Each structure stands twice: as C-alpha cells, then as structure tokens.
Image: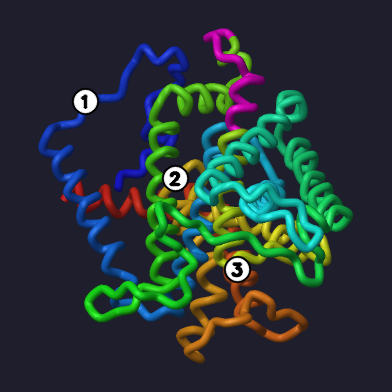
Amino acid sequence: MSDATSAEAPGPQPDGHVGMPAVHPRRSRLRWLGWGALAVVLFLVPIYLPGQYLIVSTWVMTGAVGAMGLTMLIGQAGQLSLAHSFFLLVGGVSYTVLSSDGTDGFVGLGLPTALSLVLAVVISALVGAAFAPVSGRLRGIYLGVASLSLVFLGWWLARVLPSIAGSTSSGRYADDLNLFGFDFGEKSPTLAILGVPIGQNERLFWLYAALTLIAYLVARGAVDGRVGRAWRAVRDNEAAATVMGVSVVRQKATAFAVSGAYAGLAGVMVVWWYDGLLKPDEAVDSGTYSTAVAIAYLAMVVIGGLGSLGGAIVGAAVVFGTPLIIPLLSQGDSTAVLSSGGTAFSPVVITYLAYGALVVLIVLFEPGGFAAIGRRIAGRFTRG
C-alpha cells in the first residue's frame, strides 16, 4: 500500500486542473494483486490466530481508524485538535441511542444496527462541522486548547444525561451489528470454517478489518484528490489559498467534519469492543473518552508521522497495542489491563513511558515519524 503524504503529493492545486500522474498498467495490476492477497490474509487470520491476539488486533484497528481521521486534520489540513476523545463519545452515544430500544429508562430509537452505524458517523461529522465558527478563527495552540474544552463538555453532558449515555457506574448496552442476518456479536457460534468455530472474536476481526480498509481507502482518495490539495493549500498559506479561490473556513470545517466522522466510527467500534457497553468516564482525565485518550491519539499521529495514513496505523499499534501485547506475551492474558491503575509499574505505565520517549526522539531526530523512516527504507530498495 503506497502512502503518499504531503511530501510526495503535488503542490497546492485546489482547482483540480492538474491531475495525478497516470499509473502504469503493470503497477496497477500489482497493486490489485496486493490488495487481493491482503484480503485473503485477513480472512485467514481469525482461523489461525488465538482469540486473545484477535482482541488486541481489533483494539489496534479501533485506534487506527480514529488516528487516520486525526492525521488528516493535523497533518494535511494543519488544524490542531485535542478533542478526538469527545468525538469518540459522540459516535458511541449516537449508535447506542439509535440502535437500542428505549427500555429501563434509557432513550432509544430501536433502528436497524447498520443504519444506526451510518447515522452515528454522520452525526459525528455534523458535530465536527459545527465547530467551524471556532476553527475558522483560531489556529495553532489556541485552536488546540479551544478544542480541548469539548472533552470537558462531553464528560459533563454524559454525567448529567444518564438516560442517554448511561450511568458512570453501570453504563448502558447497545446492540451488536447485524448485517443481513449475520450477527457480529454471536457468542454461541454455529458456523465453523476449517473446524474453527467462528464466534464473536473472529467475526469482529473481519468487521474491524473491513472498516479499517474502507476507512483507509476513503482517506487515501481524499488526501490524493481535490479535497486534500485544498487542505494542504490552507495548511501552507491561508492567504495564498484564498487568492487561489479556496474557501479557508469551508475547508477547515470540512477537515473537522471528516476527522469527526472517523472518530465517531472509532467510537462505535469502541462500544462493540466492550461487548456493547457504553460507559461514561468517572473522571475527565482518565477513562475511555478522557483527555488521556485525546493525548494518546495525538501521540499516534506524531509517532506515525503527521499526515501519513500508514503511519497512523503504526502509531495505533504502538500506543494501543503495546499495553495489551506485553501482558499477553509475558503472562498469556491481556484481560483487564486497560483498567489497571494505581502506582504499579503496569503495561499501561510502560506504554506511557515508551510513547512519551518515542515522541521526544521523533521530534528531535525524525519529525516525519515512522512514515519517513519507512519511505527512506523503501527508497533504498527501489534505488538498489
């Protein structure tokens, strides 16, 4: 998968008159063969990989989808946001309300789960676009601080509206995705492939892999297309972009809407990952939708390389995968690691130290992150 970033993309051409270079037919065939091979591998992975590793993989893919939205916002459009965890909460709450029945005192519409998923992403995008009056007037650290206020707003709203978001002690449950009768949350599987029962872990892996691939391809199209060129024009020089006919306010709103949509999708994936449980945080600085998670997403895009979609996936593997894979490799179990706290030298603490050190090293020695390192290695093989 190629991962052209702003460094390789054509310069600012918001009018779209200058197209991308034509792809050689042989290269195009190889690309399709690569995608086909990847699809086969992803189909076979749940059959041969133990369930605990599938759980880690789906959590990493959840982070990857959210990180792709944030790296487009920061790296391509030049808009700093610390509100990604807020949009995760918006997506999770929207899906839960739309898909659940209004029972036990909770608000619910009981819509089909597939429709609820689409509407939750749309609602998250609209909330992101609604931030346009602020994003159009602020930039840099001022915009980042202003966006951080959304995390506090979401935490407060979730606490005062338990009929919508559930209580902080027990939360509320959403329905699993059911697509044409195929239940992705099936816990008593009757389907088996090569003698392996296809239960919840296997089905969720396929679902998350498909969503991640779709998210990547859509993001790739946006970055390589007219939208991406307009974002980079705004990022590099707002005055020059205005002269070229680019609406700066509209492009900033579009960037926040797209980023919000990706975060909303990640928020729905979070709810599924927790077996349908939506549970607001008890504190604003710790939990699933907290400021700590907002910083974790920022670390993903910095470690991976600002603006790089492939780098966002690598960053998610480092930040979300490390605290789960360490106990899995050392103790054979990763359960409850995300809730571990206190002063213990836990995998979560080790991860915080590791990606904190990585951020410092990358800022000092390789601002392009893992994406730049990957391009350099690939370039050596190509020249050789």
Does the stretch in magenta take in 264? no
The image shows residue 84, relative to residue 103, as above or below, that is above
Secondary structure found at label 3: loop
Res 175 visible = yes
Q: Residue at x 58, y 42 (%)?
A: 121
Please tell me how crowded label 3 is: few (under 14), some (14-19), or many (20+) other residues with Cα within 10 Å.
few
> Observer-nearest residue: 289 or 351?
289
Question: On the image, numbered disc 3 is attached to which residue?
Answer: 274
The image shows residue 314, relative to residue 32, as above or below, that is below
Q: Nearer the viewer, mark 2 or mark 3?
A: 3
Where residue 229 appears, x then y in whole percent? 46, 24
- Residue farthest left in this picture: 26
For marks 1 and 2, the one nearer the N-term is 1
Question: On the image, numbered disc 1 is attached to which residue?
Answer: 22
- Magenta residues span 243-256
* Mark 1–mark 2 distance (CA, rounded to whole Å): 24 Å
Q: Residue at x 38, y 49 (%)?
A: 213
Secondary structure found at label 1: loop
Amino acid type of the residue that numbered disc 2 sits on in the rendered structure? Ala
* Mark 1–mark 3 distance (CA, rounded to whole Å): 44 Å
Question: On the image, numbered disc 2 is attached to which residue?
Answer: 215
Lateral position of residue 70 relative to residue 229, left or right: right
Where residue 248 appears, x then y in whole percent? 62, 19
